[in-house]
Image (spheres, rainbow, N blue to C red):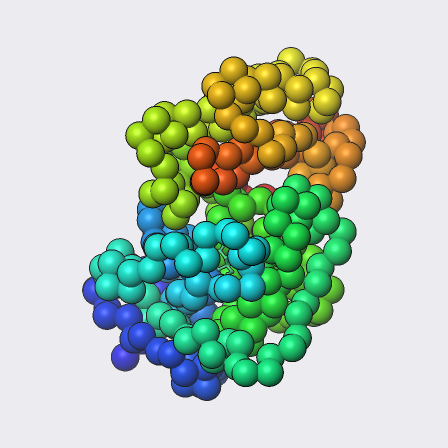
Amino acid sequence: MALPRGATKEIEPRVIADPEVVRGEILAARQAGRRVGFVPTMGSLHAGHVSLVDRAADACDEVAVSIFVNPTQFGPGEDFERYPRDLTADLAMLAGQNVRWVYAPAAETIYPLGHATRIVVDGPARRFEGEARRSHFSGVATVVCRLFHDVPADVAYFGAKDWQQTIVVKRLVADLGLPIEIIVCPTVREPDGLAMSSRNVYLTVAERQQAVGLSESLRLAEVLWEDGLSPEEVANDMKKHLRSRGIAVDYAAVVDAETLGPAVDPAPAVALVAGRFGTTRLIDNCLLPGRDDQGPSIGWDL
Ligand code: PAF
């Protein structure tokens, strides 16, 4: 029986591998008037994912989570093979979170023999992660499109930590007219500021200490932005800070928060950063408010 919205009684999620079954359940719930929230993940769940699930459970009658380590969003030589996979631990993280369904398809279900379709998003997908990881966003767009088909929810929740991904997914949804709302939720951080990421487990003790430099550079960006420095000046100081911490910088930039093109006053901007720590690559970002109070509001709820 469906729980009323906000109810606290624990439910055990039903783990489903079959796309037709999960789709049928979700369509039936929606037909019965239930609002369904969806949290797509690659597993290795942490408090950041749980915050998305919480948000979905607060706003929806039913919550679905997908767990699928998507091979097509990893480039050659990236960490697909070693990406942490532990369904039992993931289900334990979801216990008591009012998740109704966990969709955990096999790779052959999503990419059957002969699969030949890729979705390519241009524009906001081109720079930053799109440059550093050439086929990454095409892999993300392809799988997200398929997941939205299999889990036809009212609304999907994504973490702001992958800011560019949220912009790419919104572009995909708008361009293909996909009938789903996208909500972006705040980044969850460790007490010292490091953004939670499934990849943090790869860090050695020394790298973990160094990695806090990413969020430090973002705090610096906030101060410098507030002081009125230009996007280029802020980015240069971020890079200096990161290098002073011994971090190999992939990029540090301040760009328009919605288009990821040049930051134009008074629109809100975003500071984006990517750094390498041994064999681990981490990204982070922070929003920089428009400098003019009269500037356009783009309605982020962050
Ligand atoms: O953010 C992620 O975990 C993945 O990129 C996503 C959206 C689940 C697609 O595989």
Relative horizontal placement of residue 284, taking residue 15 as reference (left or right): right
Judge whether residue 284 can be spotted in this image.
Answer: no
Above or below: residue 213 compared with residue 56: above
Q: Position of residue 291 (x, y in %)?
A: 70, 24
Tell how many labels. Answer: 0
Closer to us: 205 or 296:
205
Q: Position of residue 191 (x, y in %)?
A: 33, 29
Relative horizontal placement of residue 38, taking residue 145 as reference (left or right): left
* Residue 72 location, quadrant: bottom right
Residue that extends furthest to the front in the rendered view of this protein: 77
Q: Position of residue 187 (x, y in %)?
A: 46, 41
- For image coordinates 59% across by 17% down, the residue present is 240
Closer to us: 287 or 118:
118
Relative horizontal placement of residue 53, taking residue 137 as reference (left or right): left
Q: Position of residue 109 (x, y in %)?
A: 47, 80
Above or below: residue 200 compared with residue 134: above
- For image coordinates 50% across by 25% down, the residue present is 247
- For image coordinates 38% across by 30% down, the residue present is 207
Closer to us: 67 or 102:
67
Above or below: residue 173 compared with residue 15: above
Q: Work out which quarter of the rendered image holds the N terminus and state it.
A: bottom left
- For image coordinates 68% across by 67% down, the residue present is 119
Above or below: residue 161 compared with residue 191: below
Judge whether residue 111 can be spotted in this image.
Answer: yes
